[in-house]
Amino acid sequence: MSRTPALLVTGADLAGGGAGDVLVVDGTLRAVGPDAAAEAPAGVQRLDADGLVLLPGLVDLHTHLREPGREDAETVETGSQAAAVGGFTAVLAMANTTPVTDTAEVAETVHDLGRRAGYVDVHPVGAVTKGLAGEELAELGLMARSRARVRVFSDDGRCVHDARLMRRALEYVKTFDGVVSQHAQDPRLADGTACCHEGELSGRLGLPGWPAVAEETVVARDVMLARHTGSRVHVAHVSTAGSVEVVRWAKAQGIAVTAEVTPHHLMLTEAEVAGYDPTFKVNPPLRPHEDTLALREALADGTIDAVATDHAPHVRQDKEHAFADAAFGMLGLETALPVVSTVMVAEGLMTWADVARTMSTTPARIARLSDQGQGLAVGAPAHLTLVDPTRSHTVDRALSRSLSRNNPWHGRRLTGAVHLTMLRGRVTAREGLVWGADS
Ligand SMILES: [Zn+2]
């Protein structure tokens, strides 16, 4: 990689810790704090960041990049660009591609496509079961030992609902300090046609729904399996107040459980579904307002460890159907930080230090990424995200870097915008523009 010139970022709020300077030399944080300017070499480039917040590069535990197989919806390159624009420096790419990421070969392919694109570190998630079929364990050990060093395993999109298989997966990943990320949803507690939250509203709309308990029973079972095996379990996209209660209880027992919440479950409720707009069809579904409030509280108090996007691009033909027939999922990479800023920081529920914890440090730790999430520490790789905390903007889906347009935030006003993203000291995105592609 070519050497980047030394850069002095001045006057930024350092992840909620007060104003200071940061000196970047050779892709590394060389100095942080009041004395950083004194250590800068002559002729150093300066970036005036007065009024901006400097965060460690964001890490997304849950992204669907669609490549291989559905390059019409997203590629590793376009998804990486969207991630960089959104302030991310690393993403975990889910395994439900075609072919499924259930072998070392596919994991290495995705990993290498990420390196070639070069905008963010792309870490493939390995499937728990072959073909996501829920019958036989995938090549967990081979994926872990591959060049892609897979540590997170998930059948996301589907639940590993066989308890025996889940137990074996947990025992297996423990041998290399991996984690199973569970899409908690008991398929037997919902009709195969379920497409929204089961409740009074779904009854009125005539749509089949998932009850909250379909998620909560699997979360409860899995934390007990984690206790039994002494292994780590991660709950993907927690969406109900009951799941939060279970996770809170499990953590109090010392069980190694972590959990993530999506920006859409923090901000949007089932009320969006009333217009039958498939843009708001997502799995797990948008829930009632009480759940949204419980999720915000749990993220703020640390019960939920991380924000993860569940960025799920879909082409128009798959999304523009009657609600019951449309594909599940919504875009999220470019809007995650603004949504968290709007719903958590601007509302006084979280500080920027909390954002750094839930969107960078902790997700990197959960995924055991050695090169990410080290915060603004001297010697850490210069993965940086500069945020303008007060800038409001109205989301326009046409401006997305993603190949898809299923954007639930279109037309919404959000407060807080990503100004610049840097990966190993190199600017990858600035004001929505992508380095190398737009400049
Ligand atoms: Zn999922």
Image (cartoon, helix red, strand yellow):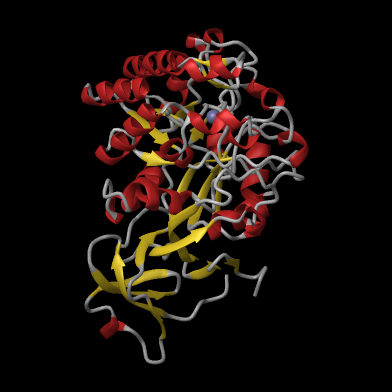
Note whether 311 is above or below 50 in the view shown.
Answer: above
- Position of the C terminus, as image quadrant, is bottom right
User: Toward which corner of the image does residue 157 lie, by quadrant?
Assistant: top right
Closest to the observer, 421 or 298:
298
In this view of the protein, can residue 183 be seen by the observer?
yes
| Left or right side of 378 for 311 | right
* Numbered disc total: 0
Quadrant of ligand 1: it is top right
Who's the residue at 23% across and 25% down the image?
Answer: 254
Who's the residue at 58% across and 60% down the image?
Answer: 119
- Position of the N terminus, as image quadrant, is bottom right
Residue 358 picture location, percent across and down: 35, 45
Closest to the observer, 231 or 82:
82
Note whether 119 is above or below 1 in the view shown.
Answer: above
In this view of the protein, can residue 199 be seen by the observer?
no
Who's the residue at 39% across and 74% down the image?
Answer: 24
Q: Residue furthest bottom?
A: 42
Residue 4 picture location, percent across and down: 51, 77
Residue 23 picture location, percent across and down: 35, 76
Residue 78 picture location, percent across and down: 66, 54
